[in-house]
Image (spheres, grey):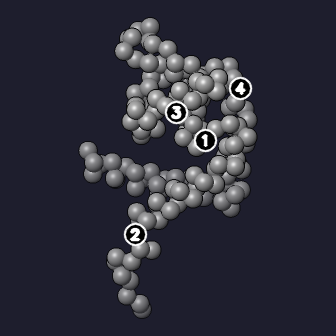
């Protein structure tokens, strides 16, 4: 039996997650390029396709991003003709982000992304669910520590 150094780089969850994150995001680049989206823009569109129009603050909460980070993302999507930004008619302090017809239509093309990524990673749908469940447990635990 070999002793495992608890400070070995390869034993660190933070290292594995950081490398996995960078590698996965880089792998998405060529799949998202034909859609005209970056990875952060893709995540933003996923949130809008799922929830419809959202305020910038709510969008940031869904994406776990600060509104100051979400605003430039939304601005670029608006410039691409995929979303609109407008003040809420209910609360003018809220900047609502809504899909345009082109943004809604892009969803049909984006349906090819998940299976393409599963194939690239050599994963089954079951593998994806197990991996996502593990990652969400880590995310939840880490967020509890920050609360």
Vertical side of 90 occupied by 127: above or below: below
Residue mark closest to the camera, 4 vs 1: 1
Give the alpha-carbon distance from disc 3 to disc 4, as whole Å.
19 Å
Q: Are marks 4 and 2 in contact (CB under 8 Å)?
A: no
Residue 6 percent coordinates (x, y) = 34, 77
Residue marked by disc 2: 12
Badge 2 or badge 3: first in the primary sequence: 2
Side of 17 where 109 appears, left or right: right
Q: Secondary structure at mark 3?
A: helix
Badge 3 or badge 4: first in the primary sequence: 3
Query: Residue at position x 64%, y 38% from top?
Result: 37
Between 10 and 4, the one nearer to me in the picture: 10
Residue mark closest to the camera, 3 vs 4: 3
Query: Residue at position x 40%, y 27% from top?
Result: 57
Residue 95 percent coordinates (x, y) = 44, 18
Query: Residue at position x 66%, y 46% from top?
Result: 114
Give the alpha-carbon distance from disc 1 to disc 3, as whole Å.
10 Å
Residue marked by disc 1: 38
Residue marked by disc 4: 105
Residue marked by disc 3: 73
Give the alpha-carbon distance from disc 2 to disc 1, as whole Å.
29 Å
Give the alpha-carbon distance from disc 4 to disc 2, as whole Å.
42 Å
Residue 10 percent coordinates (x, y) = 45, 74
Badge 4 or badge 1: first in the primary sequence: 1
Give the alpha-carbon distance from disc 2 to disc 3, as whole Å.
32 Å
Badge 2 or badge 1: first in the primary sequence: 2
Side of 113 where 25 appears, left or right: left
Badge 1 or badge 3: first in the primary sequence: 1
């Amino acid at each position: 039996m070999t002793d495992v150094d608890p400070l070995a780089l390869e034993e660190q969850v933070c290292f594995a997650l950081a490398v996995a994150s960078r590698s996965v995001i880089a792998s998405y680049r060529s799949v998202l390029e034909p859609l005209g989206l970056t990875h952060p823009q893709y995540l933003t569109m996923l949130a809008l396709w799922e929830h419809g129009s959202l305020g910038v603050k709510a969008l940031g909460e869904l994406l776990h991003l600060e509104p100051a980070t979400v605003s430039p993302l939304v601005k670029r999507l608006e410039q691409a003709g995929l979303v609109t930004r407008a003040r809420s008619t209910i609360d003018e302090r809220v900047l609502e982000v809504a899909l345009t017809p082109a943004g809604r239509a892009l969803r049909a093309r984006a349906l090819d992304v998940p299976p393409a990524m599963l194939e690239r990673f050599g994963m089954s749908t079951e593998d994806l669910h197990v991996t996502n469940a593990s990652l969400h447990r880590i995310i939840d635990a880490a967020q509890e520590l920050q609360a």
